[in-house]
Amino acid sequence: MKNKQATTIIILFYLLIIANGSLAQVKNSIYSMYGIGQVIENNYGINRAMGGTGIAFQSGNSINTINPASYLGVSPNSFTIEMGIYGIYNHASDGNITQTTGDINISYFLADLYINNWWAISFGILPVSSVDYQINSSDQVNGELTTYEKTYSGNGGISQGYIGQSFKLTKRLTVGFNAAYYLGNLTQTEIGGGENSYTEYELENKKTINGLHFNYGLQYSIEKADELYTLGLIYGSNKTLNTINDLSFTNTDTTISLEQNNQINIRIPRNFGLGISMKKGSNFRIGLDYQWKNWAQSNFNPSIFETKNSNRLSVGMEYSPNTRESKPFGQISYRLGANYQNSYLAVNNVRINSFGVNWGIGFPMKRNNSLNFTIEYGEEGTLKKGLIKYSYWAFYLHFSLHEFWSNQKR
Amino acid sequence: MMVPRKSITYILSITCILAFYLKMCDENAENFTLGEEFIETQTDITLIDTFSVSLSTVLLDKVETSGTENMLIGNYEDKFLGKISCNSYFQIGIPTSIDIENEDVYDSLYLVIYSNGYFRGDTTKPQGIYVYQLTENIVTETDEVLTNQSTFSYNPNPIGTIIYNPKPTSAEDSVLIKINDNVGLDLFLKINEESDVISNNELFIDQFHGLVLKADEAYTGSVVGFNVNSSDVKLVLCTTRFGEHGSEEIRNEFTMYDSTKQFNQITYDLSSTLLKPLAEQRYELPTTNTHGLAFLQAGVGLIIRVDFPSLSNILMFEQGTIVKAELIVLSVDTGNDDGDLNSSLLLYKSDKINRVQSSIASASKITTGESYEEEITYTFDITDYLKDELDDLYFDPEESGLLITLSSTALSSTLERLIIDNKSPKTKLKIYYLTY
């Protein structure tokens, strides 16, 4: 890297990844207790600033991983890398009790390599799901009026390392795929007893997960004067990931492995997405996405929660007042987005729905690099039927850095 | 064409402030309780108190009683254990310097001892003490100790006697016992003759041997504790010296020598009690033969063995473990006639022949209920012990006996007693069993 600024940022970023060792994206949500944990939907890049919309968007200054057919959209003859940091302030309530948490973490890392005018490659590390909760409770001894402390907690998550390719088949049609290797640990523990009561014990259920998953995309564009209309489709197959369930029990410094009665294989459901977008000139674009996931086929056993097929609708737009103007603030991109999701979890037929609204701003830097900042407000869950409602403020900071590998600077 | 660096710096600063704020508003997760109702617990703790507890009484072959701080003299009648008598043996040495002149006249010889406030039995009754002179030296056994069973021969004709009224309320009270004048005169003459016997303690003890203070069997009332140290146990030789200005009384004190040779001999007779069959330490007497009662008696050396005959059944439970185990014993209410136990109880591992092994737990008295029907229980935490015992998935009830006893100090220098009710459901083993 000739670019000093970029090098510094990348080094800092890797240090942060090493220090944190995870791509945790969820902070204290009991809805992350089930299945693969809380699924992280389109949490990356400037797509996030547009409500997670991107099925019909081309990659540009920033990489669009939502549709693997989009990688050709980066600057020609360039190598792009992108990294994100994520912070959240989460407020939970069941109507009586409130809990707040805050966290900041590494979000993702992506790269996109433009090879020629019909072929581009992208790779990166992205979060897939996260588990994070702690519930302090108590239980009663059978046969005696005595209670004792119990703590339930979960942590871990699944990340994917992917490599994807986009191919331009015709002037209008681009196709692509991502081959993703999913890897992660989900750990759930139940701790009871402790000082002055019963010998402390811990029951730990650890799922070690890995597996290869493919998803596919296509984009079809029609140019009309200075307007570009794009239709995007994505598809991912149903895939059961290799899951090793380890159940262990620890008491007075002795840990024993237990037979796991319900071997649960973690599944990535079949999913399908459709998007449309319109781009006008080089300074305005708007898109609409719909995504469906076949979660109803998954059983989160044992659970009082049922699974439903999830539906996600999002809309987003981006506007740069004038890309050619020399005045500094004319270079800035403004983004706006919203999403609504009919989640995969339901209890007593009440869906754990969520919505979010996003505002983003992008600053161009030297050599087509950019710094993007997004704020999101969202809510998840409901106070109905004794359920828990989360409201959060999240922010995303991400850098897109470009290196041109030939002399043909744009 | 670029945005000024100022804007970038601005954004990065905001991020830092946000990061700081987020870390700050991260509440302590230890307080989080939301979501309790969505949890499906996989662990349960159940109280099991149906494993039987078998108690039995063990009579220790001997209890070390030498070198204690408490000289026990007297006898009393225990409602359950019959008559218990305490005799105290000790040596007397010579004074460091003797003040006797040729013209001095022998007056008298007294034994002085000081009671220390400890007593057991009925102190309203007068007590009699006989003083006998030993006819052999006090020698320790192979393990350098003297026990409640040790005995040494003495001249059966007492050299002194007293009938006195114990005063247990005053902590220190002297008891003076007049010693026969022939003993006093003999001592006086030896001094006057500057006999070799008076020249050093060894020679003196070889000649004089020592004393034993025995209870007068005619009086049954109480056992009283007396101080054990050279200034509180002494023979006082009183002589008169006549000078130009009249007569002067001279006292020479022959004090107790080597307190490790002082010991309490404790005699008892269980032949007319529930514990009649007890003879050897290795054969415990189950409470099934003693009306459900188990006895602990300091001095005498009665301790209690605990067995869990059915506990091996716990090994048939699958996927579980003990997270707490308590042995609870209920003390029999014997009225306020005699010695409440004040010491803590100690629990030890036992071997097959009832020898005390490693220490496991201790328990102090817990009193519950109203004063007229209060209950006294002792609770031992035996969690670690049972977990260890069951760790190898094997439990031999015979090899896993326990012994309830007192500290060696309490066992050797007091007469504290505890009777445990093995019939009461309050004497039990409580196991908190975790299943997962």
Image: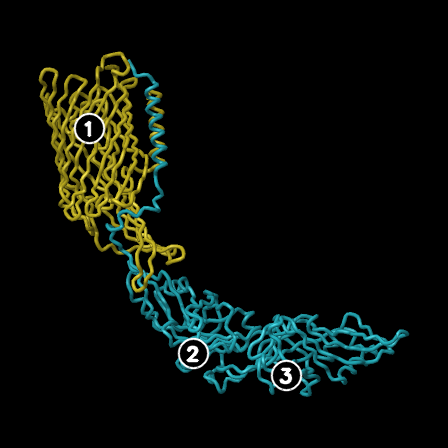
Chain colours: A yellow, B cyan
Disc 1 to disc 3, C-alpha distance: 105 Å
Residue B10 visible (yes or no): yes
| Image height of B153 relative to A262, above or below | below
Q: Amino acid at mark 3?
A: Gly
Q: Secondary structure at mark 2?
A: strand
Disc 2 to disc 1, C-alpha distance: 82 Å
Q: Amino acid at mark 1?
A: Gly
Does residue A330 appear left or right of residue B67 in this picture? Answer: left
Q: Amino acid at mark 2?
A: Leu
The disc label shown at residue B128, or none: 3
Image quarter for residue A126? top left
Asked if labels 1 and 3 share a chain, the reply is no
Asked if labels 2 and 1 share a chain, the reply is no
Q: Residue at x 27, y 44 (%)?
A: A185
Instruction: Give the residue pinned by disc 1.
Output: A337
Instruction: Give the residue pinned by disc 2.
Output: B293
Q: Position of residue B213 (x, y in %)?
A: 65, 80
Does residue B113 appear left or right of residue A17 in this picture? Answer: right
Report if the CB atoms under discs 1 and 3 are less than 8 Å apart: no
Image quarter for residue B188? bottom right
Q: Position of residue B3 (x, y in %)?
A: 30, 16
